[in-house]
Image (cartoon, helix red, strand yellow):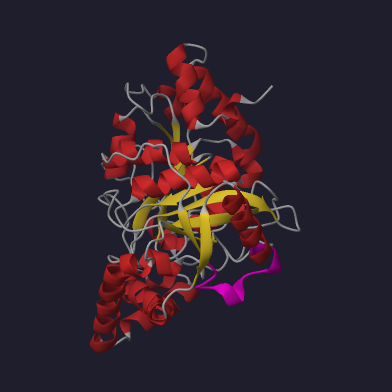
Amino acid sequence: MTDIAMLTATEATSRIRAGTLSGRDYLEACLDRIAAQEPEIRAFAHHDPALVRAAVPMPGPLHFMPVGVKDVLDAQDEPAGYGSAIWEGYRPRADAACVAWARASGGVVMGKTVTTEFATRRPGPTANPRHRGHTPGGSSSGSAAGVAAGFFPLAFGTQTAGSIIRPAAYCGVVGYKPSFGLIARLGMKVMSESLDTIGVMARSVADCALLAEAVSGRALGLVEAAAPRIGLCRSPGTPEATAETIALLETVAARLSAAGAVVRDFAMPAGFTALETAQPLVMNAESARSMGWELAHHRGLISEGLRERLDWGLGQGDAAIAEAHAMFHRLQTAFPAALGDLDILLTPSAQGEAPAGLGWTGDPAFNLAWTALHVPCVTVPAGMGPSGLPLGVQIVGRRGQDRAVLSWSQWIAEQI
């Protein structure tokens, strides 16, 4: 019999509405999995079962649904550490906007999930549930691991380069990075004003749409999708792709073509390769400005690796930063036309399987350009690598077409 903690949120809500599953029983099943596995997985920065049990969920689309909250998003009854000793013991007075709307929709906060330091550098202690000796990815490490482990069916992540798509792929779950600004960032520890995007992770595309719709107020529910016109995009990042990733992309493309999709090769226009250097420049320059207080008062508590990137960001001249922002705007404007008559792109979610060890969360080469372009991205599980760890494929669409991109992602997930 299937462990009810591993139900998708849409399955669980359907059973709860039908009266065949108790919401309290569902919460307890998730708490049981946390009690059994959290000592090894370490997905939480803070988890208090008493708080979970004391919750009185509101009626709504997320009624009794457990939600993991990445620890760069505030929750009023939880400490907020942002992955840094600088903020140890800090307790915010209010929920981040997305957390408030999750609660208002009936969701139950299960705790704060581990993030890398300020969602950027030094990894936390979280292990990949699929193989404890491998990273879950980052920076949304605990959210991805918690969904995969059955601690909660829904979780918030954030992405500045690849921090939703990559860990979701590594842990074998679905990740959705919305169009920039779709989910309000009030109450988030923002690092990069031009890039930081709140998104969601779950065990199905429909679950991602459920949570994102509830907290954004946008209509994102899946609709019937005809077979799309797909561009098979091996760039950016192709030189870093493993052999199994390249083979997986070809296999998935063949299956989608057989199912009725139009699939043809697509190469990003030459000018778009500049995003590979412009994105890190903007990210680090803006992050350095955002961390003015920490640099002024607690510089010694910032990891050496992050200090180096922040100092580098502060050293960039006005002209370089202005040109990078102008490039962002120019390419964001040009991207819809660059797709031509294609509906979506299909591209790798990550370089390959989750790397061994917990000291590195992986390479965002296949993610940073899409984040800079402000477009919606979805990763769905698509296979297994040679070490038995999950591989994903990434679906990319035009900014503002999130509902269509989610619906096409569901169609793709059904074919593979």
Specify the quadrant of the image occupied by residue 217: top left
Give the residue drawn at x 42%, y 37%.
224
Relative to 371, 381 lies left or right: right
The percent coordinates of residue 283 (x first, y second) are 36, 72
Eyeballing the image, is 393 above or below 293? above
Residue 127 lies, with reference to residue 2, above or below; the image says: below
The answer to whether 82 appears left or right of 104 in the picture is right
Q: Determine whether, in the image, residue 131 is placed left or right of residue 230.
A: right
Q: Which residues are magenta?
A: 233-245
Q: Quadrant of the N terminus?
A: top right
Q: Please provide percent x and percent y for residue 403.
A: 35, 45
| Depth check, front residue: 171 or 399 | 399
* Residue 214 falls within the magenta-colored stretch: no
Image quadrant where residue 299 sits: bottom left
Residue 300 in view (yes/no):
yes
Residue at image location 30% in from the left, 48% down from the top: 183
Task: Tell me where residue 167 appears, x and y as whole percent.
Answer: 54, 55
Q: Note whether 310 is above or below 110 in the view shown.
A: below
241 is within the stretch colored magenta: yes
Q: Residue at x 52, y 22 (%)?
A: 26
Q: Residue at x 50, y 24 (%)?
A: 12
Residue 67 percent location from the top left of the image = 44, 36
Front residue of 89 and 402: 402
Q: Exactly how many numbered labels are in the figure?
A: 0
Residue 44 can be seen, yes or no:
no
Residue placed most toward the observer, 184 or 368: 368
